[in-house]
Image (cartoon, helix red, strand yellow):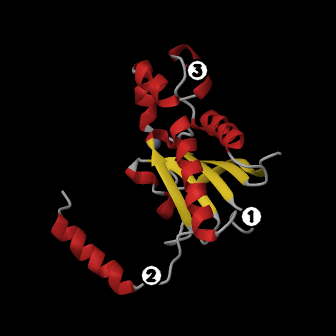
Amino acid sequence: MIDTDELAERNAGFAGGGSFAGLRLMPSGGLTVVGCVDPRVDPSDVLGLRLGEAAVIRNVGGRVTPATLRTLRMLSEVLRARAGGPRPGDVHYAVLHHTDCGITDLAAFPELLADYFEVPAADLDAKAVADPVAAVRVDVDMLGQGLPAGVFVSGLVYDVATGLIDVVVPPARVAA
Ligand SMILES: [Zn+2]
Protein backbone atom coordinates (compact mmCIF):
# COMPACT_ATOMS: atom_id res chain seq x y z
CA MET A 1 0.00 0.00 0.00
CA ILE A 2 1.23 3.48 -0.79
CA ASP A 3 1.15 5.50 2.44
CA THR A 4 1.38 9.25 3.06
CA ASP A 5 5.13 9.14 3.66
CA GLU A 6 5.53 7.68 0.22
CA LEU A 7 3.16 10.25 -1.26
CA ALA A 8 5.04 13.11 0.42
CA GLU A 9 8.35 11.82 -0.89
CA ARG A 10 7.02 11.55 -4.43
CA ASN A 11 5.42 14.98 -4.12
CA ALA A 12 8.72 16.50 -3.03
CA GLY A 13 10.24 15.14 -6.21
CA PHE A 14 7.40 16.62 -8.23
CA ALA A 15 7.63 20.03 -6.53
CA GLY A 16 11.38 20.06 -7.05
CA GLY A 17 10.88 19.63 -10.77
CA GLY A 18 9.01 22.92 -10.97
CA SER A 19 6.60 21.85 -13.74
CA PHE A 20 3.69 23.32 -11.76
CA ALA A 21 4.99 26.89 -11.83
CA GLY A 22 2.99 29.50 -13.68
CA LEU A 23 0.22 27.21 -14.89
CA ARG A 24 -3.23 28.68 -15.41
CA LEU A 25 -6.61 27.17 -14.67
CA MET A 26 -7.60 27.12 -18.34
CA PRO A 27 -6.26 23.95 -20.05
CA SER A 28 -3.35 25.13 -22.17
CA GLY A 29 -4.10 22.43 -24.77
CA GLY A 30 -7.75 23.44 -25.09
CA LEU A 31 -8.59 19.83 -24.25
CA THR A 32 -11.05 18.13 -21.92
CA VAL A 33 -10.94 14.34 -21.60
CA VAL A 34 -13.69 12.13 -20.20
CA GLY A 35 -12.10 8.84 -19.16
CA CYS A 36 -12.41 5.83 -16.87
CA VAL A 37 -11.19 5.56 -13.26
CA ASP A 38 -9.30 2.36 -14.12
CA PRO A 39 -5.70 2.90 -12.90
CA ARG A 40 -4.32 1.52 -16.17
CA VAL A 41 -5.89 4.21 -18.31
CA ASP A 42 -4.86 7.54 -16.80
CA PRO A 43 -5.29 9.95 -19.73
CA SER A 44 -2.22 11.93 -18.71
CA ASP A 45 -0.08 8.84 -19.18
CA VAL A 46 -1.69 7.09 -22.12
CA LEU A 47 -2.15 10.31 -24.11
CA GLY A 48 1.12 11.89 -23.01
CA LEU A 49 -0.56 14.97 -21.57
CA ARG A 50 1.52 17.42 -19.60
CA LEU A 51 0.39 19.15 -16.42
CA GLY A 52 -2.02 21.97 -17.22
CA GLU A 53 -2.76 20.88 -20.79
CA ALA A 54 -6.12 19.20 -20.25
CA ALA A 55 -9.06 19.03 -17.88
CA VAL A 56 -9.82 15.39 -17.08
CA ILE A 57 -13.09 13.95 -15.79
CA ARG A 58 -12.93 10.32 -14.73
CA ASN A 59 -15.81 8.05 -13.78
CA VAL A 60 -16.77 4.40 -14.15
CA GLY A 61 -16.26 3.60 -17.82
CA GLY A 62 -15.47 7.15 -18.86
CA ARG A 63 -19.15 7.51 -19.68
CA VAL A 64 -20.99 10.68 -20.65
CA THR A 65 -23.81 10.57 -18.12
CA PRO A 66 -26.15 13.40 -17.12
CA ALA A 67 -23.78 13.96 -14.18
CA THR A 68 -20.86 14.33 -16.62
CA LEU A 69 -22.81 16.93 -18.60
CA ARG A 70 -23.63 18.81 -15.39
CA THR A 71 -19.93 18.80 -14.46
CA LEU A 72 -19.01 20.14 -17.90
CA ARG A 73 -21.55 22.93 -17.60
CA MET A 74 -20.05 23.88 -14.23
CA LEU A 75 -16.54 23.86 -15.69
CA SER A 76 -17.69 26.14 -18.50
CA GLU A 77 -18.90 28.66 -15.97
CA VAL A 78 -15.66 28.47 -13.99
CA LEU A 79 -13.66 29.09 -17.15
CA ARG A 80 -15.97 31.89 -18.17
CA ALA A 81 -15.46 33.51 -14.76
CA ARG A 82 -11.68 33.15 -14.98
CA ALA A 83 -11.31 34.13 -18.62
CA GLY A 84 -14.00 36.81 -18.71
CA GLY A 85 -15.80 35.20 -21.65
CA PRO A 86 -15.91 32.04 -23.76
CA ARG A 87 -12.64 30.23 -24.16
CA PRO A 88 -10.64 31.68 -27.02
CA GLY A 89 -9.80 29.44 -29.97
CA ASP A 90 -10.87 25.88 -30.71
CA VAL A 91 -11.54 23.50 -27.89
CA HIS A 92 -11.67 19.71 -28.02
CA TYR A 93 -13.62 17.26 -25.88
CA ALA A 94 -12.33 13.68 -26.16
CA VAL A 95 -14.14 10.63 -24.81
CA LEU A 96 -11.63 7.92 -23.90
CA HIS A 97 -12.98 4.40 -23.40
CA HIS A 98 -10.89 1.24 -23.17
CA THR A 99 -10.86 -2.53 -23.59
CA ASP A 100 -11.30 -4.80 -20.56
CA CYS A 101 -13.30 -2.11 -18.77
CA GLY A 102 -14.77 -3.06 -15.41
CA ILE A 103 -18.07 -1.45 -16.31
CA THR A 104 -18.83 -4.64 -18.27
CA ASP A 105 -18.98 -6.46 -14.91
CA LEU A 106 -21.90 -4.24 -13.95
CA ALA A 107 -24.18 -5.80 -16.56
CA ALA A 108 -25.36 -7.99 -13.68
CA PHE A 109 -26.52 -4.85 -11.83
CA PRO A 110 -28.95 -3.14 -14.20
CA GLU A 111 -30.42 -1.03 -11.41
CA LEU A 112 -26.99 0.52 -10.72
CA LEU A 113 -26.44 1.23 -14.41
CA ALA A 114 -29.94 2.66 -14.82
CA ASP A 115 -29.25 5.07 -11.93
CA TYR A 116 -25.88 5.95 -13.41
CA PHE A 117 -27.20 6.76 -16.86
CA GLU A 118 -30.48 8.12 -15.50
CA VAL A 119 -32.49 5.97 -17.90
CA PRO A 120 -35.03 3.19 -17.36
CA ALA A 121 -33.36 -0.24 -17.02
CA ALA A 122 -35.24 -1.28 -20.15
CA ASP A 123 -33.27 1.32 -22.15
CA LEU A 124 -29.79 0.23 -21.04
CA ASP A 125 -29.06 -1.64 -24.28
CA ALA A 126 -28.73 1.75 -25.98
CA LYS A 127 -25.74 2.53 -23.73
CA ALA A 128 -23.71 -0.36 -25.20
CA VAL A 129 -22.01 -1.07 -21.88
CA ALA A 130 -20.35 -4.26 -23.15
CA ASP A 131 -18.79 -2.74 -26.28
CA PRO A 132 -16.32 0.14 -25.92
CA VAL A 133 -16.36 1.02 -29.62
CA ALA A 134 -20.15 1.28 -29.71
CA ALA A 135 -20.21 3.01 -26.32
CA VAL A 136 -17.76 5.71 -27.37
CA ARG A 137 -20.01 6.54 -30.34
CA VAL A 138 -23.02 6.75 -28.02
CA ASP A 139 -21.14 9.08 -25.69
CA VAL A 140 -19.83 11.34 -28.45
CA ASP A 141 -23.46 11.79 -29.49
CA MET A 142 -24.40 12.57 -25.88
CA LEU A 143 -21.62 15.16 -25.65
CA GLY A 144 -22.72 16.71 -28.91
CA GLN A 145 -26.17 17.27 -27.44
CA GLY A 146 -24.78 18.85 -24.28
CA LEU A 147 -22.03 21.12 -25.58
CA PRO A 148 -22.18 24.45 -27.39
CA ALA A 149 -21.97 24.50 -31.18
CA GLY A 150 -18.52 24.83 -32.66
CA VAL A 151 -16.48 22.81 -30.18
CA PHE A 152 -14.74 19.64 -31.36
CA VAL A 153 -15.80 16.25 -30.00
CA SER A 154 -13.99 12.95 -30.59
CA GLY A 155 -14.13 9.35 -29.40
CA LEU A 156 -11.12 7.14 -28.62
CA VAL A 157 -10.76 3.56 -27.49
CA TYR A 158 -7.57 2.55 -25.71
CA ASP A 159 -6.38 -1.04 -25.89
CA VAL A 160 -4.95 -2.09 -22.52
CA ALA A 161 -3.07 -4.95 -24.23
CA THR A 162 -1.19 -2.86 -26.80
CA GLY A 163 -1.11 0.57 -25.14
CA LEU A 164 -2.49 2.09 -28.34
CA ILE A 165 -5.61 4.15 -28.96
CA ASP A 166 -7.99 3.77 -31.88
CA VAL A 167 -9.63 7.00 -33.06
CA VAL A 168 -13.18 5.66 -33.43
CA VAL A 169 -14.76 9.08 -33.90
CA PRO A 170 -12.39 11.69 -35.38
CA PRO A 171 -12.78 15.23 -34.04
CA ALA A 172 -15.81 16.93 -35.54
CA ARG A 173 -17.46 20.22 -34.67
CA VAL A 174 -20.73 20.15 -32.78
CA ALA A 175 -23.37 21.47 -35.18
CA ALA A 176 -25.39 24.56 -34.37
ZN1 LIG B 1 -12.80 1.23 -17.32
Label 1 beta carbon less than 8 Å to ligand 1: no
Q: Are marks 1 and 2 in contact (CB under 8 Å)?
A: no
Name the spot of residue 23 as percent of width and height, x first.
51, 78
| Residue with the mark numbered 1 | 90
Residue at numbered disc 2: 19
- Label 3 neighbour load within 10 Å: few <14, some 14-19, many 20+: few
> In this rendering, is residue 58 above or below 86?
above
Against 34, residue 113 (above or below) is: above
Q: Secondary structure beneath disc 3?
A: helix
Query: Residue at point 82% right, 45% down?
Result: 175
- In front: label 3 or label 1: 1
Q: Position of residue 150 (x, y in %)?
A: 79, 54
Badge nearest the viewer, 3 or 2: 2
For badge 2, the amino acid type reads: Ser
- The residue positioned 64% from the left and 33% from the top of the image is 134
| Residue at 65% over, 34% down | 138
For the residue carrying disc 2, how many other residues have a C-alpha within 10 Å: few (<14), some (14-19), or many (20+)?
few
Label 1 or label 2, whichever comes before in sequence order: 2
Residue type of the residue flagged with mark 3: Asp
Q: Residue furthest right?
A: 176
For residue 125, the mark is: 3
Distance (Cα) linking label 1 and label 2: 25 Å
Q: Secondary structure at mark 2?
A: loop
Q: Is residue 107 left or right of residue 2?
A: right
> Is residue 98 visible from the viewing direction of this image?
no
